[in-house]
Structures are given as C-alpha cells and as structure tokens.
Image (cartoon, rainbow, N blue to C red):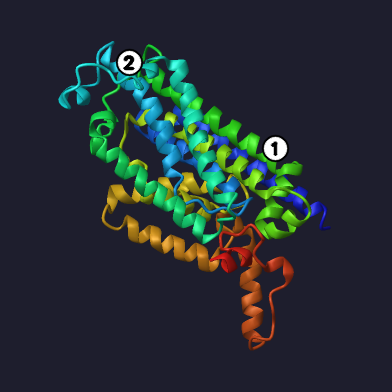
Amino acid sequence: MTLIQPARTQRNRLVLAAVIFAALAAAPALLPMFRTTLIARFMCYAIVAVGLDMIWGYTGIMSLGHGVYFGLGAYCMAMYLKLAAADGGIPDFMQWSGFDALPAWWAPFANPAFAFAMVVLVPVAVSVVIGLLTFLHNIKGVYFSILSQALALIMSVLLVGSQQYTGGSNGLTDFDTILGASLSSPVTEVALYYVTLAVLVGVFALCFFLVNRRIGKIFMAIRDSENRVRFTGYNTAVFKVFIYALSAAVAGVAGALYVSQVGIITPSDVGVSPSVQMIVWVAIGGRGTLVGAILGALIANGVETAASESFPDLWNYLLGLVCIVVVLFLPGGLMDLPRVPARIRAWLNRSRLGGGARLSPGDRAPASSATLSGKEARDA
C-alpha cells in the first residue's frame, strides 16, 4: 500500500494540473481581454511559484528574496523593450538625466536575442554567486532566509538610486513593440498569453520530471536530513546551488513575460514585499506538490484582485486571515483539503473520548506540508 499511494497521488496531481491548464487554455475564448491579461499576469506568478516550490518544498530552502531574480529578468526584457520604443535613440529618462549617448552596457540589449539570453543568464549568474557564498559555508535555515530578504532590499534600493540607468522609482515603462509586433494589439496580447501558458506547462513538466528522478530524491533527502546525505558522500552544496540557480532562471523568465504583458517594471516589484508574497502563494497552495504552487498563485491573486476591486483597504487583512487558517487548519495548503474530513472525524472522536483518541498516521499532515519541518525549526 505504501508503494501504491504515492503513484496514485502523483496521478491525481497530474490530472489536476491538466484540468488547470485546460481551463487556462480556454480562458481567452470565454473572458474579455482585460480579464485575459490579468490571468496572464497570474500565470507569470505561477511560474515563479513552481520554481520556489522546487527549492522550498522539495529541497527545504526558504528564499525570501526571489523577487530579485524575477526583477532581473523583467529589467533585462524591459531594457530591450525600452530601446525598441526609443527607435534608435536613448530612453526618455536618460535624456532627463542629462545623457546624450546610450551607456555602453545598455547597447547590447537592443538585440532581442542578447536580451532574451540575459533574461536567463543574469539571474543564474547572481544566484550561483549567492549560492556558492552561502551553501558552501553551510548557511541555511532562517539565516539563509534573512540573507535572501536582505538581498531583495538591497536590490530595490540600488534600482531606486540608479535613476539615470534604471528609471529610479518610476521603473521602466512606455513600451510599444516586441519583435516588431505592437504590444497593444489584441493578437499580440493573446499570443503572449499562450506563450506564457506554454512556459508554465514546460516549467511544470521539467520540475515534475526532476522530482521523479534520482536527483529529485536527493533534493528531498537534503530537505529531510542534509547531514545524512552529506555523510553518504554527496556534496549537498552542489545540489543546492543547482536547484537555486534553476529556480532563479525560472523566476527570470517569468519576470520577462510579466513585463511584456503588464508594460511596466518598478523597484516595488523586486523588493521584500513581493518576495514574501511569492512564498505565501506556495504555502497556500501546498508546498512539495508543484501543482499546489500553481493553484495557490492563481487563487491568491484572483481573490486579491476581486477583493481589492470591492474592498481595497481590507485585502491585506484578508490575506493575513487566509495565512492563519492555512497554517492552523491546512498545513499542507489547498492540496490538503481531501484530508479535512478525516481530521474532523478524528477531532470529533477525540472530543467524545475526552482527548484519549489520537490521530492515525494517515490523518497527519504529509512531510511536504506548508509548516516548517522539525529540521527547519531546529535551524531557526
């Protein structure tokens, strides 16, 4: 039975993922363009969430600074879009800053192939440097989380302070075309929507493939007991740097797709607050499931949009309430909902017996719950 249950769970998750992807594919035909664009933005967030689930849910690395990699990818794409809008000239904010020529390091971004490559390479390069400096020195747990959060704060401050190169607090905006196609054209918007969906499906498939191979088992072993993995002869730092860099690359691609559709990227999209929100999406959906991360990102942002339209001042309180409910009653996130009836029955039995009954092993939260594992708690 222990061998059959994981396979059944995997099949159920694949079915749920297929249903989500089918619904997303049908959305442009059923919804107005405004709502379609909103869903495209949510899919960008879902791409980031899948990458975060790989490092947090499967490897036990809680990053509170993934907005940095999302922003790096977005800024690389925005630089290309801004130069395309300038039509051979220099961006408007550089003119206001007194520039009469394009900075040398901006010039290559006029080439779309170079810009697309930098969308992946820049986040990967930064993440590898950060990963080597931290994981090789055995910095983990809450200490790594604090460092990653500080990285997000530093990046947002640098972007604001570099007004003449990054647009400062206003960011980069006013884009016209991408690869010669008008960004305001409904055809381009729908095309970008399906490109985003294709990337989401591809990222999910890649991550699903990895977690079901030997390397995925090593990731989960590192999450559960890194010391034991190290004692068996594996260099855990190498695996952690690899998965951290992969997650950064995924976030960079998501950022590039985001700025292409939303039309603006600012330092506020790179800082601490959006980075923490990314973790919240994974926790709400259920970490260590992949499809839960997608579900959490889509539902959390969908509810945020609906609530902010009607009650803009109450959304943050509602989000806090949702987080409390998830932590207390759904430790495995939304993917833990099928276990709720069994838990209610166990609670009722325990109440009738005066607290003598205990939860059966099947009623307990899975190891991939959204709560901190014992190992992470000891590190904290």
To which residue does mark 1 refer?
209
| Residue 342 on image: x %, y % | 66, 68
Query: Picture coordinates of residue 363 (x, y %)?
Result: 68, 68
Q: What amino acid is at disc 2?
A: Ala
The residue pinned by badge 2 equals 84
Q: Residues within 10 Å of mark 2 (few under 14, many from 20)?
A: many
Residue depicted at x 62% and y 67%: 374
Viewer-side residue, 70 vs 333: 70
Q: Could you say which is closer to the camera, residue 209 or residue 80?
A: 80
Is label 1 in contact with label 2 (beta carbons under 8 Å)?
Answer: no
**In the image, what residue type sits under mark 1?**
Phe
**Residue lying farthest bottom?**
354
Q: Quadrant of residue 334?
A: bottom right
Q: Residues within 10 Å of mark 1 (few under 14, many from 20)?
A: few
Q: Is residue 186 above or below residue 88?
A: below
Q: Secondary structure at mark 2?
A: helix
Asked if residue 211 lies left or right of residue 135, the reply is: right
Looking at the rendering, in which quadrant would you find the N terminus?
Answer: bottom right
Q: Is residue 258 visible?
A: no
Q: Is residue 324 left or right of residue 210?
A: left
Q: Position of residue 203 (x, y in %)?
A: 59, 34
Q: Residue at x 58, y 50 (%)?
A: 135
Please give the name of the residue rendered at 75% of the width and 41% of the height, measured from the top-left corner: 213
How many badges with numbers are in the image?
2
Residue 39 falls in image quadrant: top left
Question: Under tag 1, what secondary structure?
Answer: helix
Q: How far across and how far down the image is residue 67, in percent?
A: 42, 43
